[in-house]
Image: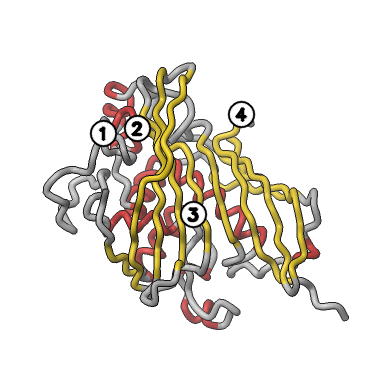
Amino acid sequence: MADDFEFPVERTPILMFAAALGETNRIYYDEAYARATPLGGVIAPPTFGVAAAHWDPAYPLRGVRRIPEPPPRPAQSGERIGGGNLTRVLHGEQRFEYHQPLRPGMQLRVSERPGRSWEKEGKKGGRMRFSERITEYRDERGELVLTATSVGIVTERAVEGGA
Amino acid sequence: MTGNARRSFEELPVGTEHEAVVVEGLSRTQIVQYAAASGDFNPIHHDEPFATRAAGYPSVFAHGMLTMGLTGKMLTDWLGDAVLASFGVRFVRQVFPGDTLTAKGRVTAATAEGAAGRVEIELVTVNQRGEPVVSGSATALLPRRKSA
């Protein structure tokens, strides 16, 4: 299982993430606008927590990225999306519990742990193995900011569900 | 547009519905843009030969988290910024380039809790054929309207 890692929340990555969603909401980039709202400043969109992947040394879907330096041994296969054969792993479910919005300037500490795992016989995909991962994001004071639960599926064949 | 003002609890009784087209004719460019922003470079989402020949899919397809993010856009545009207490989805069908997605929400429960109110929302996002691509739920904490 991966070690904890730091996730600095910054305005430019928030802008890029919101832009990729086709967002037009100024709360995600316009500091002057955002300061005048009750939120008092720019915040990140509700699914931005996944962008912590950029700082996760053990993240398996890195493309050509070599920084931060990956751990000497690859993350155990199958336990996380992309940990095994990339053609057969899918994202089955995702859930977030929000405690405070993510804001530029936050220095978050991210920790992950495995959750439940189970198997199911799929019509198209053959035997499907499901495994849950729970990720906690805490601020400098150790307060919980965000909890994310993701369910990865390893399938035998191409399937209709998952993404 | 500007940001999203928070709805009051009283504006969202049980049964209230909302829907929005969150992407029209999804482009490969947007999928690639999302890959870069999220850090998820699984080639199944951008490398056509990999997605078709190696993995057996009809083409590349969107990250589930892109579809979830688009569904989240409907929620925040509808309910306001930073009001969600939880948001969860199940990815039930892949989203392919060219797809047009409509995200739909419906209030299934509303409970007053002091100065705030808790609203439970059932979610489904469908493609241009009306097939669900994600289904899920969200909880929002909304301010209660001050009585005059």
- Of circles 4 and 2, which is in front? 2
The label nearer to you, 3 versus 1, is 1
Residue to which mark 4 is pinned: B129
Structural distance between the alpha carbons of marks 4 and 3: 22 Å
- Seen from the viewer's position, the closer of residues B41 and A101 is A101
Please say if the residues under marks 4 and 2 sit with CB atoms less than 8 Å apart.
no
As shown in the figure, which amino acid type bears the numbered disc 4?
Answer: Arg
Residue tagged 1: A84
The three-letter amino acid code for the residue at tag 2 is: Val
First in residue order: circle 3 vs circle 1:
3
Q: Are marks 2 and 1 in contact (CB under 8 Å)?
A: yes
When asked about the image quadrant of residue B41, the answer is top left
The CA distance from mark 3 to mark 1 is 31 Å
SS of the residue at dot 1? loop
Residue matched to label 3 = A22
* Circles 4 and 3: CB atoms closer than 8 Å: no
Which residue bears the numbered disc 2? A89
> Rounded to the nearest whole Å, what is the CA distance between mark 2 and mark 1?
7 Å
- Label 3 Cα neighbours within 10 Å, binned few <14 / some 14-19 / many ≥20: some
- Helix, strand or loop at disc 4? loop
Chain of the residue where label 2 is placed in the rendered structure: A
Q: Whole-percent x and y of residue A122?
A: 47, 20
Q: Chain of mark 4?
A: B
Amino acid at circle 3: Gly
Chain under callout 1:
A
Q: State the CA–CA distance, disc 4 to disc 1.
A: 33 Å
Q: Which percent across, then down, holds residue A95?
A: 50, 49
Tell me residue A32's x, y (percent): 49, 81
Q: Position of residue A59 (x, y in %)?
A: 26, 49
| Left or right for A92, reference B2 | left
Question: Mark 4 against mark 1, which lies toward the viewer?
Answer: 1
